[in-house]
Amino acid sequence: MAEAMQGANGERSHRSVMRSDSGLDLTSDFWMHRHFRAMAALYSSLLGEAGLLPGDRVLDLGCGSGTHFAWISKEIGSEGKIVGLDSDDENLETARNRISGTDYESQVELRQGGLGKLPFEDGVFDAVWCAGSLQYVPDPVGAIEEMVRVVRPGGRVAAQDVEMHSMILGPMEDELLLALKGCLPAGPDGEDFVDWFIGHKLRGYFIQAGLREVRGVMRTREYIHPLTDDERGFLDVAIPYLCTGSPGISELPDTHVQKLQSLVHSDNPSALMNRPEFIFVEGRAMAVGIR
Ligand SMILES: C[S@@+](CC[C@H](N)C(=O)[O-])C[C@H]1O[C@@H](n2cnc3c(N)ncnc32)[C@H](O)[C@@H]1O
């Protein structure tokens, strides 16, 4: 995977290719595109739970590189409108390139801004969609309250995000897997904030933000051999990142760090992904509610 990342990004370091201009891990298009392709079926089915309707005016909050625009445009038809907002210029530029020449290009407006105070009047959207972005927000309820404010009465707010309590990675000793889980981001990380355990909390946050008829959906995605090209493209990047780049790895005992490094070392014939019983499971959760 080191080769995969360096090949795609010249001299950029292991961890930096996972970051866009924002400096946040796992926000670069290099990463998002791979993850999105591997998760396409699941992500598409989760978007289907958002109940978007033809003609809807939709705010895609934390739209990143515009991964969801094509699907949203299918749901809302040619009368609908998408406003994509993200704080990251690099991702917005990629989004601009991605929609260029598509049949929905004229329906999309891109805005630069944050998930805090939103730059919109009250009630101007029929729906808000927020995928994979609330995990970076230290005050998710405040951010959802803003989503509620910009949606019309009767409109919908939907968010999907990561849930790593469901993570399985193996074959690996249980003790090592639990230690690895303990290294995953779960709150403040220096100046940043990242919570990979936000998924199961989304429903509660939605209720606290005053949404009605809140529903929650919890899904897992399993990767086992034989892997498709899209799955391998994602896992070649994700598994070494998890085992060597997760924020708390440096605080583990040396023996754990060495085992994890060996499990993803490209020279190790029994590295995780070379094992026939290799398994990776990640979780994704979603909440949807009505204003
Ligand atoms: C993991 S990406 C998800 C992008 C896209 N929604 C998807 O599902 O592929 C997270 C995105 O959230 C954006 N983001 C993170 N914190 C943000 C904030 N406070 N305000 C606006 N965007 C933010 C990042 O710039 C990044 O583009």
Image: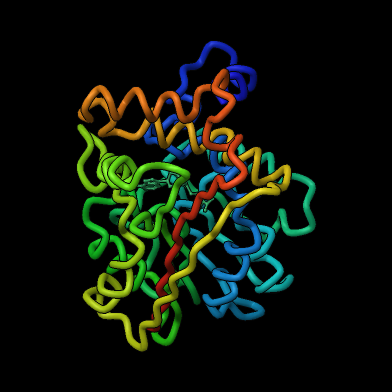
Quadrant in which residue 19 is drawn: top left
Give the quadrant of residue 74.
bottom right
261 shown above or below 162: above
Q: Is residue 258 left or right of residue 93?
A: left
| Residue 61 visible in the shown view | yes
What residue occupies the far top of the structure in this picture?
Answer: 11
Looking at the image, what colour scheme do you see?
A: rainbow
Residue at the image position 59 percent from the left and 64 percent from the top: 42
Q: Nearer the viewer, residue 264 or 244?
A: 264
Q: Position of residue 199 (x, y in %)?
A: 36, 63
Q: Is residue 34 above or below residue 122?
A: above
Instruction: State which quarter of the image contains the C terminus.
Output: bottom left
Q: Is residue 93 visible?
A: no
Q: Tell me if residue 190 comes above or below residue 283 in the rendering.
A: above
Side (left or right) of 241 relative to 48? left
Between residue 285 and residue 274, name the one nearer to us.
274
Task: Where is residue 92? Give x, y as percent.
Answer: 54, 41
- Residue 154, how many percent across, how many down? 42, 87
Quadrant the N terminus occupies: top right
Which residue does the image show at 69% across and 59% down from the upper left?
A: 70
Question: Which residue is located at x 39 percent, y 62 percent?
Answer: 120
Total count of labels: 0
Residue name at image x 51 percent, y 38 percent: 238
x and y percent of residue 14 in the render?
A: 47, 22
